[in-house]
Amino acid sequence: MWEYRKVYCFENGQSYNGYSEAAKSLGLNNQCVYKCCIGDQIQTKGFHFCYEDERDIYEMRISRREKPIIAIHLKSGRSVHYSSVKEAVQELDISPNTLYSILSKRVKKPRIGYSFKYAVQ
C-alpha cells in the first residue's frame, strides 16, 4: 500500500496526509502544494507548506531570511544595515539568489557593487 508523506501548513499549524489532502482542505491546487513541499515554489495563495519530516529544515531556511544583514559598498566602504534579506533585495533591486550567493561566500567578487554579511545579534 502506498504511504503518503505528511504535509505541514505553517499558517494553520495543521498536518495533512499528503499534498492532495492539504490542497482539498484549503481549496488549493494539488501541484502548487506539491511544488511548495519540494522547494520549487515558496507559497501558494499565502500558504507555506513543507513535508512534516523536513519542518526543521524549512524553519531554518525561513529564519535565515529574517536575519539582519549589512551591505558594504565596495568603493566607498559605506555600510547600510537591513532588517532582513527581503528588505535588502527590495531596496537594492537584486535577486535573493545573488544575495545568498554572496552571503555564503560562493561569489568571491560581487559585480553588484556591494558585499554582504550577516549582522551579529
Image: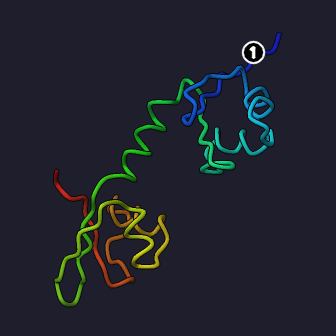
Q: How many marks?
A: 1
Looking at the image, which is closer to me, 33 or 10? 10
In the image, taking residue 34 as reference, residue 75 lies left or right, namely left
Question: Is 12 placed above or below 89 here?
Answer: above
- For label 1, the residue is 3
In the image, taking residue 50 as reference, residue 108 lies left or right, namely left
Badge 1, how many Cα within 10 Å: few under 14, some, many 20+? few
In the image, taking residue 51 as reference, residue 56 lies left or right, namely left
Rendering coords of residue 43 (x, y %): 62, 48
Residue depicted at x 30% and y 79%? 114
Question: Is 87 placed above or below 9 here?
Answer: below
Q: Which quadrant of the structure image shows residue 38?
A: top right
In the image, taking residue 65 as reference, residue 53 lies left or right, namely right
Residue type indicated by callout 1: Glu
User: Element under label 1?
Assistant: loop
Rendering coords of residue 60 (x, y %): 40, 39
Color style of the picture: rainbow
Q: Residue furthest bottom?
A: 75
Residue depicted at x 60% and y 24%? 14
Residue depicted at x 25% and y 63%? 117
Rendering coords of residue 90 (x, y %): 45, 73
Residue depicted at x 52% and y 30%? 54
Question: Is 85 placed above or below 59 here?
Answer: below
Quadrant containing the N terminus in the rendered view: top right
Q: Which quadrant of the structure image shows residue 48?
A: top right
Rendering coords of residue 80 (x, y %): 23, 75
